[in-house]
Every structure is written in C-alpha cells, then in structure tokens.
Image (cartoon, helix red, strand yellow):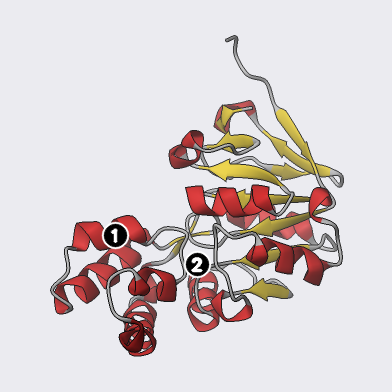
Amino acid sequence: MGLMGDHFLPARGLLFDNDGVLVDSEVSVVRSWTRWAMENDLDPVEVMLAVPGRRAADTVALFLGADAVPAAVAHITRLELEDVGSTTAVPGVLELVPQLDGVPWAVVTSGVRDLAGARLTAAGVPLPEVLVTAEDVTAGKPHPEPYLTGASRLGLPPTDLVVLEDSPSGVAAGLAAGCAVLGIGELALDTAATAVVRDLTGVRWTGTGLLLPAATLLRG
C-alpha cells in the first residue's frame, strides 16, 4: 500500500463519544474502577477489561447481583466525580470544536450526565446543546440506541452523520445506527470503522464533512 493522502468523510453533523474521543479520562477511570474492584474483592484487570464503551450499570451488572447494581453505580460515579481533575482534552479537540459553530453536533456517551459534563468542563471542551447520556437510553452501546437518539435529537438521518468513537462497542453502535464511523486510536484498527485516525490533531470541518490529514490517518 502506498502512502496515504488526506481523507474526506462527508457529513452534515457529528456525534462524538466522550471518553477517549473528546476527553482523556483514562488515568481517572483506571484509578476509580481499580479502587472499586478492590473494595468488592474483584480482579481489577478483569473489571477494567469490561469498562470501555459500556455504561457503568452494564459493567457493574457483570460482576454483582441485580439488587446491588444501583448502589454500586452511585458509588463508582462518586469515585469518578471526585477524580475528575485529571481529565484533559484529546489532542486536536480544542481546535476542532470551535469550527463547529452552527454545525449540528452532539456528545453521545455511556457515562452518566453529571460525570460527562464534569469531564468536558475539566478538559475545557465547550458543552454541546445535545448531550445523550446513560440516563437517556434503555440499551447502551454496542446497541445502536444511543446514536439513534443522538441523530433524532439533531433532527438528521443517521446516514448524514459521522460518529467519532474509540471503543469497539462504540464503533459497533455507530455502524449499527447507520452512521459512518471515524475510529480514534489504535484500538479502533481492529474494528469495521470507516476510517481511523491516531487522534483529532489537524482534523478540520470543511462545511460538508471532516478532512482527515494524512499525518494522523491510520486507515483510510
């Protein structure tokens, strides 16, 4: 395969996952969930493998009985909120988001509303008008409901939207909803994402879609 040039993804609007796409909360996530696992006599490695792209309630339900889930979700959310200060913006995000003035865009996250808002604020990312969180859906990613909800709230058909995702379950949700999916990071190379970039450095909104520079493109 020859050298890749710039790549263009047409779109009328964008649906961003939050953690790993807009904000880097990995330090906080690992610290909080490791603490939670140890408090519950669980293997932190096993728990961490279950966390990416899932709602906290769906992760907790893998390890605890149904009766224990609501209290456990409240506890892990509290741990993560207390540790929100280490959240930073993913490279390129603070340059891309200001270009979206007047463009329909939303954040669609498996996180709960308070945590999603706190992480965006801590990272200096402007809050979108449309924020779809764990509380807004009955089925979390990889089910398409979160992204279908985001598309509906933006008033656009999924085929006119690009989803930006880092986790395999999130990529699967975006594709199942009928959207093109831009994978973020090397983990997305193992998915069926439409294209994959290292991060959002140099990614530009052209007015009719996203221009992905060759320098950050992992797969076109």
Q: Residue at x 86, y 47 (%)?
A: 207
- The quarter of the displayed image where residue 61 is located: bottom left
Q: Nearer the viewer, residue 166 or 205?
A: 166
Query: What kind of residue is marked 2?
Result: Ala
Q: Secondary structure at mark 2?
A: helix
* Numbered mark located on residue 114 in the image: none
Residue 217, percent across and down? 58, 30
Q: Nearer the viewer, residue 83 or 182?
A: 182
What residue sits right under mark 1 in the picture?
48
Residue 12, percent across and down? 85, 52
Query: Looking at the image, which residue sits at the far top?
Result: 2
Q: Quadrant of the N terminus?
A: top right
Q: Is residue 217 left or right of residue 39?
A: right
Give the Cα separation between the discs numbered 1 and 2: 23 Å
Q: Is residue 180 left or right of residue 32?
A: right
Q: Nearer the viewer, residue 91 or 14?
A: 14
Q: Secondary structure at mark 1?
A: helix
Crowd band around label 1 with a 10 angstrom C-alpha radius: few (<14), some (14–19), many (20+)? some
| N-term-proximal mark, 1 vs 2 | 1
Crowd band around label 2 with a 10 angstrom C-alpha radius: few (<14), some (14–19), many (20+)? many
Residue 49, percent across and down? 31, 55
Residue 165, percent across and down? 57, 51
- The quarter of the displayed image where residue 214 is located: top right
What residue sits right under mark 2 in the picture?
123
Q: Residue at x 65, y 36 (%)?
A: 194
94 shown above or below 114: above
Query: What kind of residue is marked 1?
Result: Met
Count of marks overlaid on the render: 2
204 shown above or below 88: above
